[in-house]
Image (cartoon, rainbow, N blue to C red):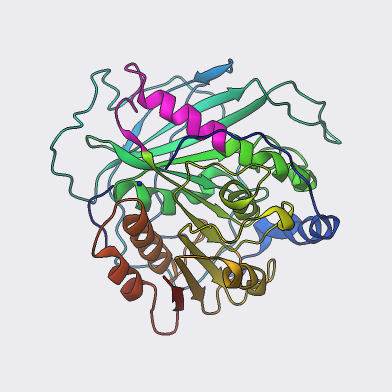
């Protein structure tokens, strides 16, 4: 169930990153097969959202705007089997055609907001000139980090809470179009960075797993950049982003990034109010995580995940202060209900994670009860919680 919306601080900490050798071995072996983890029989999800391709020109700062309006997704039906997510080639630049980009600021005063909203997709290229991109076996070191970012937002007056959604190793924002559209249609601005060395359009991306230590910094830079667009009266995001309500979520290696930016002293961002982990694990210097932080968290994991065993997230859940929620997808594998592979679990994940954001980013008084209802489906999912 979805409802209208609307809690962060401001800090941009220094980054020092240490990587445990044992974790390096784990992710290098497990996540190299991440994009192949779904079962081999399947159909495409009926609710897959439309994404947009836009032109971008890299500079120090932000470039490129284009929007495509998408109708709110429906969740009345879902395929009954699961398919591997196809690796997508990088998109080519195309002339921008903008929809809903009037430079007039959206009204932010007393406006009745009723979800679900139509959504618009745009792309931006953010260039962080303060941090380098390390050399890899197939590429030289670069003095900056270029982060192409897909943003899905409600086509309605804001401001709306911001959620950063992180893809996994060899993943892409385009593989997360269904869940990002579900969140945006419920009243959230969803920013999906394509990490410079681990996204699926990078040759040999699976060998670049260690760059995850730089990805929490990418998240913070994306937050900075999206908030700047909300202050820019020439941007289609002008006035739409609520910088006082920020969440972060991630799948697989993107969850390792999320644990880092939410908990780790290397790269913690104090602006984050809540986070969602999907088929994840801790990779960045686990000893530097502050599990006692009273930060709301939801973890979603399949109990048949062949890539990252559910025990990895369960062990973290047991240490977290909470409030905390753990959704187990019964028989779910690594991308079940998360990437656009099309499974019966999709409505469970879409609804329960949206309920979570509604509870902790939008202060919806009824959303906590909705989590309990939507996260428990006979034969598909169970719920563990400690609020």
Q: Is residue 89 visible?
A: no
Quadrant of res 198: top right
- Residue 84 as seen in the image, left or right of residue 186: right
The residue lying toward the viewer, choosing from 201 and 381, is 381
Looking at the rendered structure, the number of numbered marks drawn on it comes to 0
Residue at the farthest bottom position: 378
Q: Is residue 200 left or right of residue 371?
A: right
- Residue 292 appears left or right of 247: right
Residue 215 place in picture, x, y as percent = 65, 41
Task: Indicate the position of residue 243 as horizontal and vertical percent values.
Answer: 38, 36
Name the residue nearer the viewer: 360 or 32. 360
Whether the magenta-drawn stretch holds residue 347 is answered as: no
Above or below: residue 334 compared with residue 129: below
Frontmost residue, 205 versus 17: 17
Seen at 60% across and 61% down, the residue is 291
The residue drawn where x is 34% and y is 16% is 234
99 lies above or below 117: above
The quarter holding residue 280 reads: bottom right
Q: Is residue 229 magenta?
A: yes
- Say whether residue 187 is visible: yes
The percent position of residue 165, horizontal first and vertical second, equals: 50, 47
Q: Which range is magenta?
A: 220-243
At 13% from the left edge and 37% from the top edge, which residue is drawn? 110
Viewport quadrant of the N terminus: bottom left
For the C terminus, give its image quadrant: bottom left
Residue 230 spot, x, y in % from top left? 36, 26
């Amino acid at each position: 169930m979805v409802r209208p919306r609307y809690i962060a601080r401001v800090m941009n900490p220094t980054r020092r990153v240490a990587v445990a050798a044992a974790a390096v071995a784990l992710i290098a072996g497990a996540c190299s097969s991440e994009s192949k983890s779904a079962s081999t029989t399947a159909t495409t999800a009926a609710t897959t959202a439309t994404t947009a391709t836009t032109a971008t020109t890299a500079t120090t700062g932000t470039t490129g705007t284009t929007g495509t309006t998408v109708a709110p997704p429906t969740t009345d039906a879902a395929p009954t089997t699961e398919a591997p997510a196809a690796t997508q080639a990088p998109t080519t630049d195309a002339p921008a055609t903008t929809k809903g980009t009037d430079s007039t600021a959206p009204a932010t005063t007393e406006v009745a907001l009723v979800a679900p909203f139509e959504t618009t997709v745009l792309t931006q290229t953010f260039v962080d000139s303060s941090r380098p991109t390390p050399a890899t076996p197939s590429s030289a070191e670069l003095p900056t980090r270029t982060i192409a970012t897909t943003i899905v937002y409600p086509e309605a007056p804001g401001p709306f809470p911001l959620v950063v959604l992180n893809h996994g190793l060899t993943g892409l924002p385009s593989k997360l179009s269904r869940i990002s559209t579900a969140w945006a249609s419920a009243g959230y601005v969803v920013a999906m960075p394509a990490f410079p060395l681990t996204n699926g359009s990078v040759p040999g991306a699976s060998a670049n797993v260690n760059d995850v230590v730089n990805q929490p910094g990418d998240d913070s830079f994306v937050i900075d950049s999206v908030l700047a667009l909300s202050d820019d009266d020439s941007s289609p995001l002008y006035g739409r982003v609520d910088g006082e309500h920020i969440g972060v979520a991630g799948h697989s290696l993107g969850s390792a990034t999320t644990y880092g930016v939410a908990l780790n002293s290397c790269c913690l961002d104090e602006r984050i109010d809540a986070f969602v982990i999907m088929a994840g694990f801790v990779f960045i210097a686990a000893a530097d995580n502050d599990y006692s932080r009273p930060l709301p968290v939801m973890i979603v994991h399949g109990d048949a995940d062949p890539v990252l065993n559910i025990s990895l997230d369960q062990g973290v859940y047991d240490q977290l202060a909470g409030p905390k929620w753990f959704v187990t997808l019964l028989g779910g594998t690594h991308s079940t209900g998360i990437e656009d592979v099309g499974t019966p679990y999709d409505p469970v994940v879409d609804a329960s994670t949206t309920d979570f954001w509604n509870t902790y980013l939008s202060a919806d008084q009824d959303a906590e009860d909705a989590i309990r209802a939507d996260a428990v489906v006979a034969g598909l999912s169970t719920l563990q919680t400690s609020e």
